[in-house]
Image (tube, helix red, strand yellow):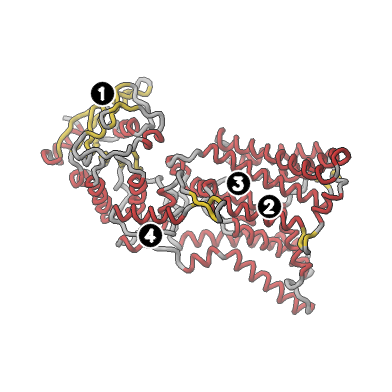
Amino acid sequence: MSSPPAATVHVAPQADHADKARTPLQRVADLRAWLFLAFLILGFELWSRLDFGGTFMFNTFNIQSIAVFAVAPLLLATGQTFVIISGGIDLSMGFIMGLAAVVAAHVINWATPGMGFFPAVLLGSLVAVAIAAVPGLVNGMLVALLKVPPFIGTLGMFGVARGVAFLLAGGTTVPVKNEVFAALGNGKLYGVPYIIIVTAVFVLLMHYLLGQTRFGQHNYAIGANAQAARRAGINIKWHLLRLYILSGSCAGLAGVLYAARFSAGAAQAGEPLLLDSVAAVVIGGASLFGGSGTILGTVAGAFVIAVIQYGLVFINVAPFWQFISVGVVIIISVLIDQAQRRFSGGRQSE
Amino acid sequence: MSDMTPMGQPLLEVRHLSKNFGPVQALNDLTMMVRAGEVVALAGDNGAGKTTLIKAISGVYQPSSGEILLQGKPVTFGSPQEARDKGIETIYQDLALADNLTIGANIFLGREPMRRKFGFLPVLDRAKMAEAAKSTMALLDFHVSRLDAPVSNFSGGQRQAVAIGRAVYWNAQILIMDEPTAALGVPEQRKVISLIHQLKAQGRGVIFISHNLQDIFAVADRIVVLRRGVQAGERRIADTTHDEVVKLMVGG
């Protein structure tokens, strides 16, 4: 796709000095997911007060429930953010999460009698994330070395991870008997659930990785123009390998926290979360064409989805409306993104 | 390459270079030279071998026979990266920049400078990138005020200047420019032509590929015309005319 001639004229100022910096409108657009989140919360707050005179947001229980609700989709979505910025997509993350949950459950059950509670949890978590990195590595090899389109390669891995996870789980859920693991999933530190602390630290790390390191910078460059990145000497194959290992590991961590929260590993743990993760990234302002997106935007996107899902239950709307409203929000986000590209003079993907 | 070659001294020599792809002889016994501070135009019809020649010089292809000398020393390049490390930079008419990154980030793409935050955390040194972008673009007589804007916000000529700026920053001695004006409007074309004059004044060698004879006559010192993989003629711009060049290109 090339931009129409009119757009070229639009972005070609006559004088050298006429370079356009970001307009205030663009800056607002960068924050649109957060603005939307604020409006959403305001809306639920009003509804809640008018309908039954109670507060929605100024209630620690609600805030905590929403945050706990957002943990798994957010973990998937941070990894997905990297992949989508690079111009790809990772469809296998949901079942990699399930695989990791099952592996964590088995390993912890196996190790607890011999090693004790805490070492078993540590071992089980590490093994689960390491196992989750394997389908990630295969995804990376398919995309980077064998040039399989990410959509197809990770769709194949979606099936493989799903099958392996169900086989390992024996077709059922695998309960975990370990107090420390249960405490990790449900305990609190100064009133803040551990899994929220773990997730927050991890999201901060990913924010740093994307915004402040060469890996993150190259990820943006590859998503915008892989050819230019290659010519600049970036090893694209090596980058993509690490990228899909990263997204697999994110799913692995999500699986471990899931197993901790429910004291059970389930192969289908992440099944409904995959599309939520993609939705969070898109609502957060990333472009499915690659090259743009931020972790902070994705955080807002994940919370938009969590607030919609929790809020609708809270105000007593039939749960099926969740699917409809999240779907509508995704479509609106994509439309806004496209309109923004058209009007801000940014070039369409080439 | 750290030392600048004195003006007028040979920078790059191509001797008896041939390249064949199977039975197809893309380039046959070609010899040419670029001196420091000289702009050499490569002209020729499609398929004449211009692209093969610059790809051999820039390390994309390995020549089948013949040799390339850089400042008098024979060199071979296993990859474009090796050619770039020795000071030969190729600037493509498009696909050269990551549109979503700043000028500084594009200049440093793949070689980003880092600094330590709080004394231990390595982070991208954006201030250094912006500073280098500002000084490099000023060297090319492009004065940009906003260095935090992605290059998609700039015009075609400015983007071309960023690509050239990257080569200049990394001290390229020889710039190969493949149709640098093809995608630009007329005022922007003039800007790129004046950029090439700047590079020349800085003592760099430029190989300039263009279909546009007007551009070639505006900027080049010499012109090498290729036809079907062989050198059809070489003229000093001062001693030739449009008609003569066209005759060399089409033959007859």
Q: Is residue A208 left or right of residue A2?
A: right
Element under label 1?
A: strand
Report the residue at 45% width, 62% height from top: A344
Q: Are marks 2 and 3 in contact (CB under 8 Å)?
A: no
In the image, residue A210 above or below residue A106: below
Q: Is residue A13 left or right of residue A154?
A: left
Taking depth in this image into account, of B57 and B121 the one nearest to the observer is B121
Q: Are marks 4 and 1 in contact (CB under 8 Å)?
A: no
Kind of residue indicated by mark 2: Leu
Residue, far front: B119
Q: Please give the chain letter of the residue carrying mark 1.
A: B
User: Spatial distance from mark 4 to mark 1, Cα to Cα?
Assistant: 45 Å
Q: Is residue A99 left or right of residue B93?
A: right
Q: Are marks 4 and 2 in contact (CB under 8 Å)?
A: no
Report the residue at 27% width, 27% height from top: B229
Mark count: 4
Q: Position of residue B116 (x, y in %)?
A: 52, 52
Q: Are marks 3 and 4 in contact (CB under 8 Å)?
A: no
Q: Earlier in the sequence, mark 2 or mark 3?
A: 2
Taking depth in this image into account, of A61 and B99 the one nearest to the observer is A61
Residues tagged by mark 4 and mark 2 found on one chain of the structure: yes
User: Spatial distance from mark 2 to mark 1, Cα to Cα?
Assistant: 60 Å
Q: Which residue is mark 2?
A: A75
Q: Position of residue B167 (x, y in %)?
A: 35, 44
Question: In the image, which disc is placed on residue A213?
Answer: none
Quarter of the image holding residue A198? bottom right
Question: In the image, which disc is placed on residue B16?
Answer: 1
Quarter of the image holding residue A59? bottom right
Report the residue at 80% width, 37% height from top: A168
Residues tagged by mark 4 and mark 1 found on one chain of the structure: no
Element under label 2?
A: helix
Report the residue at 33% width, 63% height from top: A17
